[in-house]
Image (tube, helix red, strand yellow):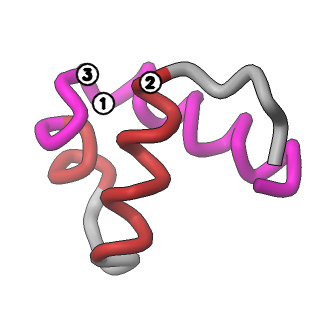
């Protein structure tokens, strides 16, 4: 896992580990982002292989 993950990235990963069936809207509410930035972060994490 990359060492330079932000706290928001860590929150996203924790939420998805807890419930991988979350919609992007639900995930965004949990981590305190709007849907577009949340989706971009999830995509970036996936592209990084996290």
* 45 over 13 or under it: above or below: above
> Which segment did they paint magenta?
29-50
Quick check: marks 2 and 3 in contact, CB under 8 Å? no
Q: Main secondary structure of the magenta part?
A: helix
The C terminus: image quadrant: bottom right
Helix, strand or loop at mark 1: helix
Locate residue 26, reporting x and y percent.
16, 52
Locate residue 3, reporting x and y percent.
79, 30
Q: What residue do we see at 21% from left, 46% from top?
A: 25
Helix, strand or loop at mark 3: loop
Label annotation for residue 33:
3
- Say which label, 2 or 3, has the lower sequence index: 2
Residues under labels 1 and 3: Cα distance? Answer: 6 Å
Would you say 5 lies left or right of 25 here?
A: right
Quick check: marks 1 and 3 in contact, CB under 8 Å? yes
Q: What residue do we see at 57% from left, 31% from top?
A: 41
The residue where tag 1 is placed is: 35
Nearest to the eye among marks 2 and 3: give it.
2
Nearest to the eye among marks 1 and 2: give it.
2
Residues under labels 2 and 3: Cα distance? Answer: 12 Å
**Magenta highlight on residue 31:** yes
- Say which label, 1 or 2, has the lower sequence index: 2
Quick check: marks 1 and 2 in contact, CB under 8 Å? no
The residue where tag 2 is placed is: 7
Locate residue 12, reporting x and y percent.
41, 45
Q: Quadrant of residue 32?
A: top left
Nearest to the eye among marks 1 and 3: give it.
3
């Amino acid at each position: 896992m990359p060492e330079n993950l932000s706290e928001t990235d860590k929150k996203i990963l924790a939420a998805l580990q807890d419930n991988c069936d979350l919609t992007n809207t639900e995930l965004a509410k949990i981590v305190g982002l709007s849907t577009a930035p949340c989706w971009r972060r999830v995509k970036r994490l996936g592209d990084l292989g996290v």
